[in-house]
Amino acid sequence: MSAKNLVTFTGQILCRENGRITWSTMAGFGEQSKPIAHEIQKGSIAMKLRNKILLGVMTAVTLGLWQGTTSAAAYSTNPSDVMQTAPQGLKIDGKGYFEVPAILGADNVTNMAKILPDSGRSSLAPMDGVELSSYGVHDTGGAVWSHDKSFDMYQNQRASMWIYVSGVTGEQVGDGMAFVLQNDMRNNEGNRAFSGAGESLGVWGVDPKSSTNNAIAGTAIQNSWALEFDTRLNQTVPTSGWNIKDAVPSDFDNGKGVGYSGTDGATPSEEITSQHLASGYPAQNNTYTGIGQTATFPELSLLPRTGYYYTQKHLGLIRDSAGDDIISDAAWHHVVIDYKAPAAGSTDGQMTYTYDDEDPKTGGPDRDVESVTEDIDLNNLNVSENDPDVYWGFTGSTGDTPDGDLAGGGTETSLVVFEQVPTQVEAKSDVAMTDMTQNKAITTGSSFVKGNDRVQLKYNLSDQSNNRDWKDVNAKLKVPAGVTLSGGNYQTGDSGAIHSFSTTPASDGYIDVSLGDLSATTGGTATVTLNGTVDNTAGSRAVAMSKFIGSNAITTAATPSFNVTKSALTLSLDANSQTQSINAGATSGAKVTGTIGLPATDTANADVTLHATWDGNDYELPDAEAHPTGSGTTRTFSLTVPGNKLTTTPNPHQLALYATDGTENSATATATVTIGQIKLGDTSSQLTFTPTFLTGSDQTVKRDSDWSLDVDDTLTKGSTWTLSAQTAGLYRDDVDAPGNKLSGALVYKSTPTAKPQTLGTTPVAVDTGRSDGAAETTDVASDWSGDTGLLLDVDGGATQGTYSGEILWTLTSAP
């Protein structure tokens, strides 16, 4: 009886492309097989890929420019309702910016101010606001002050905010609010300072109802500067013999103002006729003018004597020349406070306040943008370079019911939503729009832009505070309607890396780009660039507002409005050039032809230029292909993309073409070039033969299980392919030595009766196919039976052992 010796054979797949091994799966039993060196003929493809195609369809949804932002057309007076209409602002609750004391001032006024959440609305980022007064509640005061004296008058500072100050239509509102800088340390008032309600707005002097002139300044918040938003025209002139103690002071606007960038030294000359913004020093005697009028003082005497009422000096006046309301119109208004510190050796700072530079719905200018610059004498705030800090905040008040008005008259709902608070960062942003085709800057009202022109939008962000970071900045980008974007990138700092980003809008209609922190150590700057094309439709393009939302500052940037003229230059591709397939390795290249339509017949071909990108990268055409041929208004062009560009990655390729004639652009036409290829797809990870007993006689060993050997075919129609196999044999214990080689051979049989073909170092064809032009996968091994395909012939003299080896599969194709 002969011995029963068990022999197990394992196989391996090795794939090669152009003679270089690209993929290998090792045999079982933990043995390491060596690759077989082999060169294959040109055009052969052997690599493991899977022919899975994933096609996505995306729908862009464009919403309103500012999420959740509308003007309060219904004249809502409920602060929570009004808050739902607010433009995007910062979240200030819990940030330590403000103190909201319960009691205000020396008279212990109940503070009506509160932090108002934006719950229930859809915001671009978490936010809240400050409520200073509420409609229907008379003679109230409200104030929020910085937690400590943090506004450094010897450092540049910036703040921006949205304000809403309105009541019910048809009623007299009152009285307004004020942005205040103050250094009032009487009885440690500081961040609970407040003067009085009504026309005082919580900061100006309170009429003492006295027979002594100029006693009023001492009742104001001391060492202060204020910018008022005055909604009620206080122009009562007492009649002779008036009862001074029973009268409600309402006289401040009988004074005159200095309009538009007036300075402290200017003489007030303009009558106050309507709602207005104005500034001044509440605690300075020259802010007020006492006017004597015969009055009665019942507690002193029934005899008349002179009593005084007071008018107020208004500096840097902003108002509507026609007398219309510019504050209480049931809308949000944008305010920017920009303070410049004194020059060395000076005590004069400079404050610029800008009103209505943004519309809450469109982001563009609201009405005529108005800006005033006023000097601030720091002596009036009692500060120095060694002690430069003051409190900053907002005050507001309501008053009495005007004679003959409705019950809610003299009151209003007043809210503030902050974009930037002082002492944090000086964040700024702007956008420059350039017509790259004509190399011209696009500004408001530009009319030279033509359809199909290439444009670039460059957003510049900066934090000018020098020692603080603009944190967690997220860009929310909008572009003008009718501009199709082709790409975008951003760079932080002057030498930071350039990062590309997707220009596909999110569900809220914005393009989102996370910029991170803009660090003071790197200059606190960032540049965001968008490139695109103007659609070839004549008409106007409205402004588009982008927002840059950080956790401690928010800025905006609006593109200019401009006009577009339709371009008459056209470019079209011939039908057979719009989409085409070419086999990998083709040397003839991809030919693309088409026509160019010109607006004039006398245009020289040399003046018409084709521009191209290949897979998104600039592709310079040879001069002979960069210009059309022919005459008349229709010219032809022909170009060939060389074979060395017809790679299998990416696949398909995109050739984008447009034409210029020196003044106009054509639209872009895109040719799609698909590279046909043949490659190995899903394949069995290891190939095994059935365990076999040696008998001393020659025998044929079958495969242990079904093998999988996929060929993925995307060749052009009529192309043929051949799959070949070769091997250097099987070796015991994976040791390539003459004594370890299996006595036998791998063979291939196409049919059960066919003569076996022995696999050696010369490739043996195991299958062929012809492409029908459609993507197709063929499992070569699926038709193999137990007596066909790859088999193992074992000689009678073989010795026992575990053998392993490699099979090199080679795919070749021909047109």
Image (cartoon, rainbow, N blue to C red):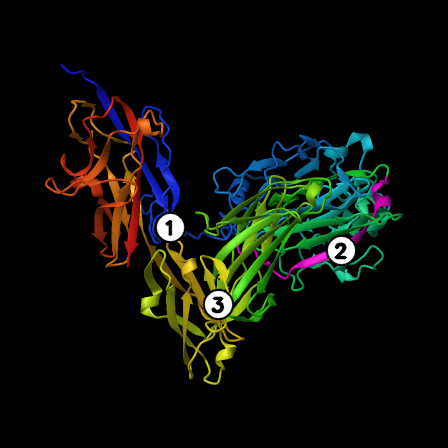
Q: Position of residue 427 (x, y in %)?
A: 66, 47
Q: Position of residue 805 (x, y in %)?
A: 31, 32
Point out the tag, 3 or 1, that comes first from the N-terminus.
Answer: 1
Magenta span includes 373: yes
Q: Residue at x 82, y 39 (%)?
A: 388
Q: Name the one closer to the observer, 214 or 189.
A: 189
Q: Secondary structure at mark 1?
A: loop
Q: Is residue 313 above or below residue 621?
A: above
Residue sitting farthest toward the top? 1
Q: What residue does disc 3 label?
A: 621
Q: Amino acid at mark 3?
A: Leu
Mark 3 vs mark 2, foreground winner is 3
Q: Is residue 130 magenta?
A: no
Question: What residue is at 35 percent from the left and 66 percent from the top?
Answer: 577
Q: Is residue 739 shown left or right of residue 698?
A: right
Picture disc at residue 373 = 2
Image position of 731 with respect to 181: above or below? above
Taking the image as shown, residue 814 lies to the left or right of residue 195, namely left
Q: What residue is shown with label 1?
A: 58
- 276 lies left or right of 301: left
- Range drawn in magenta: 360-385
Residue 672 shows in the view:
yes
**Considering the numbered disc 3 on the image, is that residue within a helix, a strand or a loop?**
loop
Residue 772 spot, x, y in % from top left: 22, 56
